[in-house]
Amino acid sequence: MLASTQLLLIMDTAIINVALPSVGRDLGSGSAGLSWVANAFLITFGGLLLLGGRAADLLGHRRVFLAGLGVLGAASAAGGAAGSVGVLVGARAVQGVGAALAAAAAFALLLNLFPDGPDRHKALGAFAAMGGLGGVLGTVLGGVLTDLLGWRSTFWLNVVGALLLAVLALRLLDGNTRSPERGFDIGGALTATAGLGLIAYGLVGAADAGWTSARTLGVFAAGLALLAAFAVLEKRIAHPLVPPAVLRRPTLRLANCLSALAQMTLFPMFFLVSLYLQRVLDQTPLYGGLGLLPLSLVVVAVAPQTGRLIHRLGLRATMTLGFALLFAGMLWLGLALAAEGTFLSAVLAPSLVLGAALPLVMVTTNVAATADAAPGETGLASGLINTSQQFGSVLGLAVLVAVAAARTDALGATGAVDETVGFKAALLVGAFFAACAALLTFRLRLPAPASAPPHQDRVGGALD
């Protein structure tokens, strides 16, 4: 059930990407307005994950999970009824709020259900598999629903999904999982959320405004100032949102860094390959999305086996293998793209390598980042790793799209050949990120096993 939350959130992102052209035609919006339909969600989602995770620890994991699903469902209904792009952007921003609460609480509930070890590895593999399946279903359903019922139906699908998950949560999850710690860091919550939100806003807007524009630099400066204020506050209060001692754990810091690097490589890869299939190979949006189906099927197949690999090879060796495959797949893909190519000759084989790499890097970084989380810190650990992944996705997309655009513009044309050159350059930069991560895995040192297992919820099969 908890893994289905991951499926719903990933599916929603994929569906929106497919439905955006129809939204623009119906509501009379250009590409700039449509970009914020996606970006508004990314900003609030990335900015509130940390707060959502800590709130889950202090207020109760099931309670925050249900609240997130309620906000997500209500905002999706508002999006389905939106009569203008402005209303739709607002609805998407509120969707991000609900998604942050639900995602952070769901991951924390998983950590409570499964102690560190093989069972947790299997559960994290299920999360990765459901994410891959969500990408496939989102792409397919986005095309089918938009064609048959219109883009509004894609938002109502979220409403139904959130309602079903809420009913299951009430039946399956223990409502008494809050931390015994009391006190809530209001100042830390406000500065962290605002600072992260401004950084996300600056990243997603940099492509339009320019990386060195006064607006972008001003937003980054304001976000960094708020995060600096957050760091000062956390050292001076009794119940900090993020205890400084947690951030001093070397395994946690490195795992979050590696997780961000993984997303900086993977998230923009999906976007760039979809653009290549549509703009260069002249595929329809639906067929362009289906071009990533083999990759997603490999994710679904490999993810459940990741726990066995960790048991046989060890966590660090499995992580290194994952990032090595990620580097090889990105390098192969970047070198294989050609203006006169085909899906079979340029995309299929390297995408299968990337499909094997994705669950290996995601599961191992999640395991490392949460290995020494105490029972009262599961929400915090969830918020930190989810924040790292989200900001890695946003930063990677901004950087790699800027690289592709700069390389294409440098050629002075916008034909298929020139666009392909831009896509190749961006993918090779992604390969560089993966190579850096692969080298960093050799610095990983796991903490000693915890003496006591985490709290167990009343139903051990909640991931079914």
Image (spheres, grey):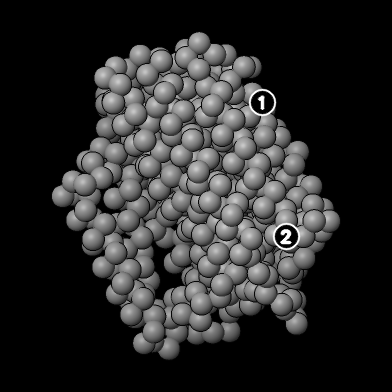
Can residue 9 be seen by looking at this rendering?
A: no
Between 425 and 196, the one nearer to me in the picture: 425
Q: Position of residue 446 (x, y in %)?
A: 68, 70
Place of residue 43 in the rendered image (x, y in percent of width and height, measured from the top left): 37, 51
Q: Residue at x 28, y 61 (%)?
A: 223
Residue where numbered disc 2 is placed: 315
The residue under the point 75% across, 82% down is: 451
Eyeballing the image, is 293 above or below 93? above
Residue 183: give its label. Answer: none
Q: Residue at x 47, y 14 (%)?
A: 339
Between residue 433 and residue 352, name the one nearer to us: 433
Asked if 385 appears above or below 94 in the picture, the reply is below
Q: Quadrant of residue 231?
A: bottom left
Specify the quadrant of the image occupied by residue 92.
Answer: top left
* Residue annotated with mark 1: 349
Q: Is residue 147 left or right of residue 198?
A: right
Image position, residue 244 (x, y; %): 46, 80
Residue sitting nearer the eye, 364 or 328: 328
> Does residue 254 appear in the picture of this structure?
yes
x 67%, y 52%: residue: 320
Q: Amino acid at mark 1?
A: Ala
* Residue 463, horizontal then vertical, whole percent: 72, 54
Q: Is residue 36 above or below residue 60?
A: above
Q: CA distance from mark 1 to mark 2?
A: 26 Å
Q: Is residue 457 left or right of residue 159?
A: right
| Crowd tier of the residue under label 1, counting other residues whose Cα lies within 10 Å: few below 14, some 14–19, many 20 or above | some
